[in-house]
Image (cartoon, rainbow, N blue to C red):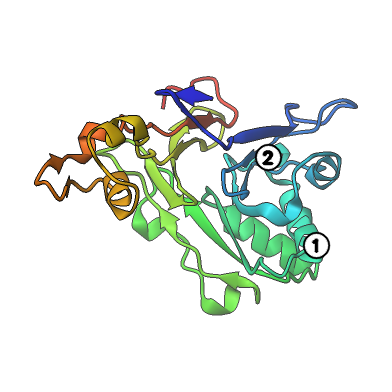
Amino acid sequence: QRTNNRRRTTQMKITFLGTSSGVPTAERNVSNIDMMLDNGSVYMFDCGEGTQHQLQKSIIKSGKITTIFITHMHGDHVFGMPGLLCTLSGNNPPTRTHIDIYGPLGLAQYLRTSLRLSDSHLGFTIAVHEIVPEETTEDQLPQVLESELLPSEKRGSYIVYDKEQSCYHIVKQDGVTVRAAPILHRVFTVGYVVEEDSSPGKLDMDLATKLGVPKGPLLGKLKNGQDITLTNGTVIKSTDVIGPEQKGRKAVILGDTHDPSG
């Protein structure tokens, strides 16, 4: 992709492991979308039954999955979660010590119950951060005792709706910002917006040379947005030789909905 005459050397890759609705078919599995970021990390969106098999057929490396996002609690979007976590634990690379999971209120209890009753033990820690429906009051939120957490579970957070910005602020990491907003479905459902950080503009080396900037640390200062003064007293502003900022790419990933306007 070229933007503002600057080539991006990396890509945001999206892989569809499941696009079927409700139940799997012979050709299509139920919901799962994976996004590979520039740094190699993989964000997983929804985890229907059979996701483990689909991963084995795909280019996605399970060891690169760092964060999981769930759009809503219908089974074709979450039934694969307990099994996936156990598989990731069995294939756990030494570098993975933790996975953060984001999804609607109730997701933590579902995973806690499934893993505990199946006597499943994970080789890394998890934290489930639950997105709270706007109409839910603070006194309606479950108060989970420390003794109720899984041995491999760190206490997650409740994410409440920001009325001023009309969204949920999910997480900012890996050079991207993830937000969410409610969309209409039979149960509480969100869509996720993944937006890359903007990149600095490109240094115009030819122009910098014509203006008398020598090779060396002064070029680095210009790249970092600092103005410089040459030995002859000439002031070179960073904006004179740096191109416009490159806006990050944005992907919107929706759950099931008949109205995504949120």
What amino acid is found at the position of numbered circle 1 in the picture?
A: Asn
150 relative position to 166: left or right? right
Residue occupying the point 90% across, 27% down: 26
Element class at badge 1: loop
Q: Position of residue 93 (x, y in %)?
A: 74, 65
What amino acid is found at the position of numbered circle 2 in the picture?
A: His
Q: Quadrant of the C terminus?
A: top left
Q: Position of residue 48 (x, y in %)?
A: 74, 41
Q: Residue furthest right?
A: 26
Q: Image height check: is 81 above or below 163?
A: below
Q: Quadrant of residue 5?
A: top left
Front in this rendered view, residue 247 or 240: 240
Q: Position of residue 243 (x, y in %)?
A: 31, 30
10 relative position to 141: left or right? right
Label 1 vs label 2: CA separation?
22 Å
Q: Residue furthest bottom?
A: 147
Mark 2 highlights which residue? 77
Q: Position of residue 177 (x, y in %)?
A: 43, 44
Nearest-to-viewer mark from 1 and 2: 1
Residue occupying the point 11% across, 42% down: 234
Residue occupying the point 51% across, 51% down: 105
Q: Quadrant of residue 206?
A: top left
Front in this rendered view, residue 62 or 76: 62
Badge 1, how many Cα within 10 Å: few under 14, some, many 20+?
few
Element class at badge 2: helix
Mark 1 highlights which residue? 91
**Which label's residue is closer to the chain start, 1 or 2?**
2
